Image: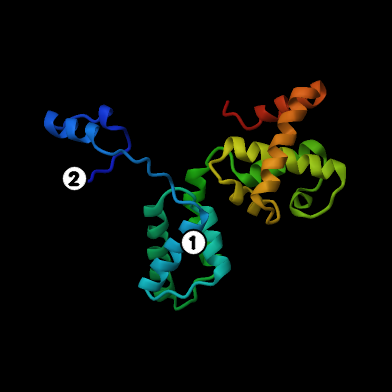
Amino acid sequence: QIVMTSDRPPRELQGLEDRLLSRFKWGLTADVQSPDFETRIAIIQNKAEQDGMDIAPQVVEYLAHSVPTNVRELEGVLTSLLAQSVLTQRDIDLEMVKQALRHIIEEVEAEVNVDFIQKTVADFFQVQVGLLKEKTRKKEIVTARQVAMYFTKEFTSHSLKTIGFHFGGRDHATVIHSVQTVSDLIDSDHKFKTQIGELRKKFVPK
């Protein structure tokens, strides 16, 4: 048996002998997706246990939310954290993790990130950005929160669960409802559609 991984389907592979290419085309092809949140948690916990690291659950969750796609990068961050912990004789806390992740987050979301979306939407609707994460049900804040979730889903690679995490720990069902509500309003309310169009311009690279 031969097992091979690649970033493209067998028909697009180049440089292989015809007999191998034919065998891969004939064989089973499986689409390997990026690990979900729970899987990233398990990867971090397993790596930490192997390396003898003691990491608090909230720090593990922050790591899993902040590096959503690249397992190698995630393991690299953990290796870096272990080295820093040993050199500085400090426990691995949230401050250390944020410092280690700063360049990664900037690279992954160099143009548009959750903080930018939240601030831009809050400014547009003239509400305090912190209220987007609160449980208040005031109409203007609910609308701003739903719009911010809508754009976060559109302009970032975050999962629904991660989006909810950034909006006060809301679940994925709330995010789905928010996105659908905004989509429905765009279809039915011309003024709202115009507002969304103006906001979208702020997130599209010029």
Which is nearer the eye, 107 or 189? 189
What quarter of the picture does the C terminus occupy? top right
**Please, is residue 64 above or below residue 23 in the view?**
below
Q: Earlier in the sequence, mark 2 or mark 1?
A: 2
Q: Residue at x 22, y 46 (%)?
A: 3
Q: Residues within 10 Å of mark 1 (few under 14, many from 20)?
A: some
Image coordinates of residue 37 in percent, x first then y, are 52, 55
Looking at the image, is mark 2 or mark 1 nearer the viewer? 2
Looking at the image, residue 184 lies above or below residue 61: above
Relative height, residue 21 to residue 152 (above, below): above
Q: Is residue 148 visible?
A: no
Say whether residue 151 is left or right of residue 98: right
The percent position of residue 84, horizontal first and vertical second, equals 42, 69
Circle 2 sits in a helix, a strand or a loop, which is it? Answer: loop
Q: Indicate which disc residue 41 carries.
A: 1
Between 101 and 70, the residue placed more toward the observer is 70
Q: Residue 60, position in %: x, y?
A: 52, 65
Name the side, left or right, on which 148 lies relative to 137. left
Which residue lies at the image location 47% right of the left edge and 75% below the top edge? 54
Q: Which residue is mark 2?
A: 2
Q: Residue at x 85, y 49 (%)?
A: 137
Question: Residue at left 48%, top 76%?
Answer: 90
Which amino acid type is shown beneath numbered disc 2? Ile
